Amino acid sequence: MQTGGRALGQTPRTGKPTATSWLIQQLDDGQPQTIVVYGTSLTAGGAWVHQLSSELNARYPGQITWVNAALSGKASASGLAELDRRVLSKQPDAVFIEFAMNDAFTEYPAGNIDEDITVEMARSNLQEMIARIKQQNAASQIVLQTMNPSWDAPNGNQSGTKRPALPDYYQMYRDVAAEQNLLLIDNFPVWKKLQANQPAEFSQRVSDGTHPDATGYARLVTPAVLDGLGGENGLVLLVDVQSGRTVLHNQSDDSLEIISYTINSPAAALKTSWSSMADQQLDGWHEANPAASHLSELNPTGSGSLAVDERFDLGAAWSPSGALDLSFNYQTFDGVQHSGLVVYTTGVDERLTIAGDSNSDGVVDLADYTVWRNTLGATVTVGTGADGDASGVIDAGDYTAWKANFAASYSDAAAIGDGSYQSLPEPNAVALALGALMFATAWPLWQQRW
């Protein structure tokens, strides 16, 4: 869609579609949902719960029943023991889980149910909770979270000292999420970056050594949860805390036509060498006096269009050693100013994976066709491997995505060969591959008949 300007998306560099969570899909379909949040005091009293519920309740009025079943001061052994009474009895459609902070705690008294929980014990407890939730409702959405670091605050509670292996427990959550294809909100790397870059700010946000304040949650956690769930978030600024790469991502339900945007950093953490729209030679776009405290661009003669789920790479616009203090606003073609969501995260490069780039090397080429052909018919994690259309199944739609993006790259250095012509496997080859798949599927059934 274009109005007075060109599309911003790097056609044909179409990113793999972002999967909207099952929870949001159900809400979008008008289905009532019961959401249970389960974990430690980080959930029992964490402001992220109120912030998230307020946002989703506003989007889906009257559809959501919220249950805060968290256990302050308890770990996953207690969580497993209380699962029936506090969680399963509520018949949840979605469950958020975090117990790592207290699983890592080494000072429970002798005989306490949560005493000396090792990483493997915590894994077993978590896996059992997941299995029992799924046993009750196979379609339930389970969301795992890593949370913030702990530290030895001046209050003397030695929260950090008493959790020496906390990162190992968080890594276990990542592993389980990957193994079971669960949604993971990985907050820990973002909090660690704040702690490293702005130690005074981190100390203020987590003043007692364990529990973030509402400002910390609003800045670092709640936006990440909303981003992870998907849905109508408007135009989002993704910021990779490891590389500094920034990406505009249209998470609205419609195309967006923008005529300007501004990224602000009071502590001057921005880089004027960012890959601006003007640098990328998009028609009509001009930088507006860029400085480390603000990066702005405008299009006085037209607009730029971002399709639904489209992403636009702004390069390394933020310094990885800088303050996590960004704000972001943009103006649409109708003249309305919008405040955009800033999401600090990791793995932004993966969001720029091109549909059809089955081997994730940054280039869509014949090697990706081979991956597609060899995995045709497989069920995979949505958006991974050759699943270019994010359907969860390797099928003809993924071939279409591969062919549409053939020779595309997100890296100027990753040129395709020497520019010589490369013929593409034509649809008859696709038909043969699909036919072989159908025959392989039908043959056992045919044998059973005879």
Image (cartoon, grey):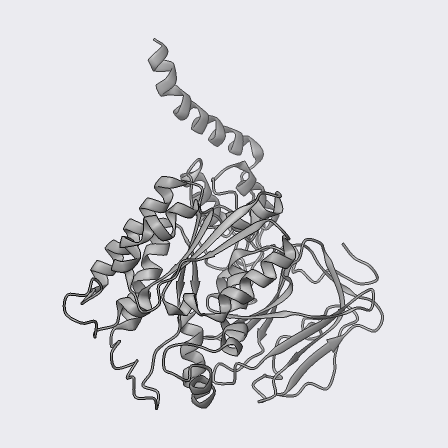
Please provide percent x and percent y for residue 113: 20, 62
Q: Is 51 left or right of 156, judged from the image as shown?
A: right
Q: Name the foreground residue: 277 vs 175.
A: 175
Q: Is 119 left or right of 16, judged from the image as shown?
A: left
The residue under the point 28% across, 49% down is: 128
Please provide percent x and percent y for residue 129: 31, 51
Q: Name the foreground residue: 358 vs 421.
A: 358
Point out the residue furthest to the left here.
Answer: 110
The residue under the point 39% across, 50% down is: 181
Q: Is residue 214 above or below residue 17?
A: below
Please provide percent x and percent y for residue 197: 45, 86
Please provide percent x and percent y for residue 416: 54, 58
Q: Is 83 left or right of 353, judged from the image as shown?
A: left
The residue under the point 81% across, 65% down is: 333
Location of the C terminus by quadrant is top left
Note whether residue 449 is visible.
yes
Note whether residue 389 is visible.
no
Q: Name the foreground residue: 64 vs 371.
A: 64
Location of the N terminus by quadrant is bottom right
In the picture, residue 424 is in which quadrant? top right
Q: Is residue 117 above or below residue 365?
A: below
Point out the residue furthest to the top here.
Answer: 450
The residue under the point 26% across, 76% down is: 163
